[in-house]
Image: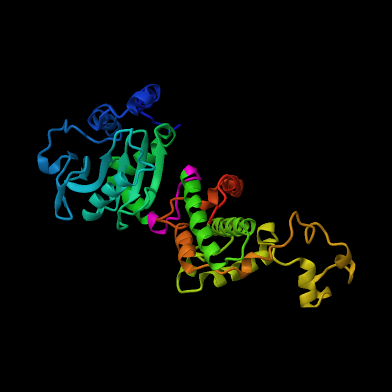
């Protein structure tokens, strides 16, 4: 727990936790949330939300529902936070019945406000969750709720992450340049979120679009072959993306494939390289013995000539399944592949792949078994 969590924040967290079902009801209004939870929460960060200091309108640190022009219309973000009369960030409030992590509309609304006002960072919260958005990225109505999101906390995180929140969003920290440094750090952001149901739901969309395209361009495939091709392709992309964030592969090497045409033939080259590099069943295309035959044999074999050919070791040829002789020769259009690859990078993707759990491909496969493509 943070070293200096105010009692007021502990009380807010305990209160929300105790009556969470009540606050999630549609009858619980946003105005009530602001008065009972958000105002005291922001006050705990050091903001004079009700202007107890009696400052003039020009220098009030917090403006409620300030009118701003967005696309010619007058809009009003719920909170405008200011230092010396200068805006530093907006906060948009939603009642807990609105699922801000999954609903794209509130995120788009907040990002439009901040984008128009040239604010680099702004917040979206229903107290149950607290989201930070990089608002330098132009918002589109078709954006996912996770697009440009750099932080997502649950209310139970407010105690453990108290120092992080105060270190970024308190007036004192902002005046010392903390928020400016945070904004600068997000220029090379790779994502922050852990794997969740939203990620698995995203993969479900990839599987559907990929299955349709593979079936269209490769009409001779059986259902079993189609399912195998779709799952293997997605698994390989996720695996290589994880390798990027862990520093094993060059960062964004997959993303470079989006430049130009014939994405899959170029991707196949990376898959073949991975076969040599990782010696993994995921990229098992050619048995080692066949490679030795093609390259002249003993020069690539530490054992006496002929021994490995007769008795292959488990680390080489005795795999749990035969080599993949199907997927490298498939025809796949650029469009679905570019969409999938683009979805693996910030800002479209909020996930930090280096910390994805080791069993993520297992989770993806389990979901796959429950929803194999069925195309007519």
**Residue 190 counted in the magenta span:** yes
User: What residue is drawn where x is 33% and y is 26%?
Assistant: 23
Query: In the displayed structure, does residue 91 sit left or right of residue 312?
Result: left
Query: In the displayed structure, does residue 282 sit left or right of residue 322?
Result: left
Query: Is the residue 161 above or below the residue 201 in the image?
Result: above
Name, please, the residue furthest toward the front.
Answer: 376
Query: Is the residue 247 above or below the residue 302 in the image?
Result: above
Q: Quadrant of residue 67?
A: top left
Q: Of residues 337 and 193, which is closer to you in this image?
A: 337
Query: Is the residue 37 above or below the residue 111 in the image?
Result: above
Name, please, the residue furthest toward the bottom.
Answer: 296
How far across and down, in percent of the image, does residue 56 sit?
A: 10, 39
User: Could one spot residue 173 in this view of the protein?
Assistant: no
**Residue 372 counted in the magenta span:** no
Q: Quadrant of residue 188?
A: bottom left
How far across and down, in percent of the image, does residue 161 sit?
A: 42, 37
Instruction: Tell me the quarter of the image containing the N terminus.
Output: top left
How far across and down, in percent of the image, does residue 311 sit?
A: 88, 62
Q: Which residues are magenta?
A: 186-197
Q: Of residues 116 and 99, which is closer to you in this image?
A: 99
Name, please, the residue furthest toward the left.
Answer: 56
User: Could one spot residue 362 in this view of the protein?
Assistant: yes
Query: In the displayed structure, does residue 323 sit left or right of residue 121?
Result: right
């Amino acid at each position: 727990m943070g070293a200096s969590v105010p009692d007021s924040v502990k009380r807010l967290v305990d209160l929300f936790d105790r009556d969470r079902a009540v606050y999630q009801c549609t009858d619980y209004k946003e105005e009530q949330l602001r008065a009972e939870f958000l105002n005291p929460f922001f006050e705990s960060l050091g903001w004079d939300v009700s202007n107890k200091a009696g400052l003039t309108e020009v220098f009030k640190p917090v403006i409620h529902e300030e009118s701003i022009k967005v696309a010619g219309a007058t809009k009003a973000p719920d909170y405008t936070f200011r230092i010396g009369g200068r805006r530093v960030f907006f906060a948009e409030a939603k009642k807990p019945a609105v699922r801000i992590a999954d609903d794209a509309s509130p995120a788009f609304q907040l990002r439009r406000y901040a984008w128009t006002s040239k604010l680099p960072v702004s917040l979206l919260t229903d107290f149950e969750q607290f989201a930070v958005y990089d608002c330098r990225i132009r918002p589109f109505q078709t954006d996912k709720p996770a697009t440009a999101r750099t932080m997502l906390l649950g209310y139970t995180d407010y105690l453990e992450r108290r120092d992080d929140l105060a270190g970024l969003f308190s007036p004192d920290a902002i005046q010392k340049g903390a928020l400016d440094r945070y904004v600068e750090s997000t220029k090379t952001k790779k994502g922050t979120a852990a794997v969740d149901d939203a990620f698995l739901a995203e993969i479900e969309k990839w599987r559907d679009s990929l299955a349709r395209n593979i079936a269209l361009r490769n009409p001779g495939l059986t259902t079993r072959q189609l399912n195998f091709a779709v799952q293997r392709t997605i698994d390989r992309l996720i695996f290589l993306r994880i390798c990027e964030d862990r520093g094993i592969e060059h960062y964004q090497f997959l993303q470079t494939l989006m430049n130009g045409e014939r994405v899959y033939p170029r991707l196949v080259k990376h898959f073949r390289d991975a076969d040599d590099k990782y010696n993994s069943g995921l990229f098992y295309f050619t048995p080692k013995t066949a490679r030795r035959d093609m390259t002249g044999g003993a020069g690539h074999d530490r054992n006496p000539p002929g021994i490995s050919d007769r008795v292959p070791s488990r680390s080489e040829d005795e795999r749990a399944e035969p080599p993949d002789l199907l997927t490298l020769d498939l025809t796949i259009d650029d469009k679905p592949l570019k969409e999938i690859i683009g979805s693996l990078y910030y800002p479209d993707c909020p996930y930090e792949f280096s910390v994805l759990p080791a069993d993520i491909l297992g989770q993806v496969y389990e979901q796959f078994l429950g929803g194999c493509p069925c195309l007519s």
